[in-house]
Image (cartoon, rainbow, N blue to C red):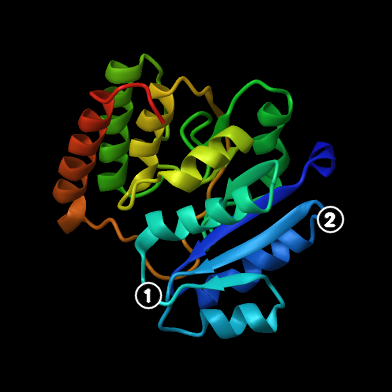
Amino acid sequence: MMIKSKKILLIIPAYNEERSLEKLISSIKKLNNSQLHILVINDCSSDSTAVLCETLNVPTVNLPCNLGIGGAVQTGYKYAFYNQFDIAVQVDGDGQHNPEYLENLVKPLINNEADLVIGSRYINKEGFQSSFMRRVGIIYFSKMLRALTGQWITDPTSGFRACNKKVIEVLSKRYPMDYPEPESIMYLKRNNFRIKEIPVNMEARLEGKSSITSLKSIYYMTKVSLAILIDRLRNQIV
């Protein structure tokens, strides 16, 4: 496999994912690739996530307080930066992201075709397509980012993404805290990083539910829209 030529960190943010993590970790280990290093960021879970990770003998950062998805993922990028990983891949701990796509996800990075690669469920439109409200938000942010950056991103909220060393360094120093995926795309595009999407199939969550509910949708779209607009107005300085 092509990914055996690079040192790759799989960043798995997890908050109360004890019922999903074991299957995900097992799927990754079945790839039998010594260059894939797993790091679970346990975001102060109230369930047995920490105990499960210890039982599975998985490297874990147990955060002393809940930082949210942005802080948890940035912790992973900091780890990747200080430990000199070539590539970092974000894989959600809820079981939606299939590790079988890892090689396709990192291939454009290895071939120097992109700096950030996003796994999109809306290129082939197969597999789990998310909830109605989330699809509305995805279309909205796709159009907004197209207007501001000139690039059409079909799945701007996807957390299944891989990046190279340059982006690892940048995101280790600055990463949006709440609902970070669309805002981070704006930030990277503003600083002239190359972004590419590849088609993936996603699964429905194995357990639990998304933090983005219908009641939070208006707040989410307003907050992220303002963050994107403010970022667009900044100078091209990382």
Q: Quadrant of residue 25?
A: bottom right
* Contact, mark 1 vs mark 2 (Cβ under 8 Å): no
Which of discs 1 and 2 lies nearer the camera? The answer is 1
- The outermost residue toward the top is 150
Q: Secondary structure at mark 1?
A: loop
The structure residue drawn at horizontal position 40% and vertical position 17%, both measured from the top left corner, is 151
Please state the horizontal and vertical placement of residue 152, each as a whole percent of the image.
Answer: 40, 20
Q: How many marks?
A: 2
Q: Is residue 6 left or right of residue 210?
A: right
The structure residue drawn at horizontal position 77% and vertical position 62%, both measured from the top left corner, is 29
The residue under label 2 is which amino acid type? Ser
Q: Nearer the viewer, residue 37 or 138?
A: 37
Q: Nearer the viewer, residue 10 or 84?
A: 84
Residue 136, compared with residue 11, is above or below; it is above
Please state the horizontal and vertical placement of residue 194, each as a whole percent of the image.
Answer: 53, 22
Query: Marks 1 and 2, Cα distance to the nearest angstrom?
Result: 31 Å
The structure residue drawn at horizontal position 34% and vertical position 46%, both measured from the top left corner, is 176
Residue 164 visible (yes or no): no
Q: Nearer the viewer, residue 141 or 62?
A: 62
Q: Secondary structure at mark 2?
A: loop
Please state the horizontal and vertical placement of residue 115, each as a whole percent of the image.
Answer: 58, 28
The structure residue drawn at horizontal position 35% and vertical position 37%, both measured from the top left corner, is 182
Residue 238 visible (yes or no): yes
Residue that label 2 marks: 34
Q: First in sequence, mark 1 or 2: give its number.
A: 2
Quadrant into which the C terminus falls: top left
Quadrant into which the N terminus falls: top right
Residue 198, compared with residue 220, is above or below; it is above
Residue 234, compared with residue 28, is above or below; it is above
Residue that label 1 marks: 65
Q: Quadrant of residue 110?
A: top right
Q: Residues within 10 Å of mark 1 (few under 14, many from 20)?
A: few
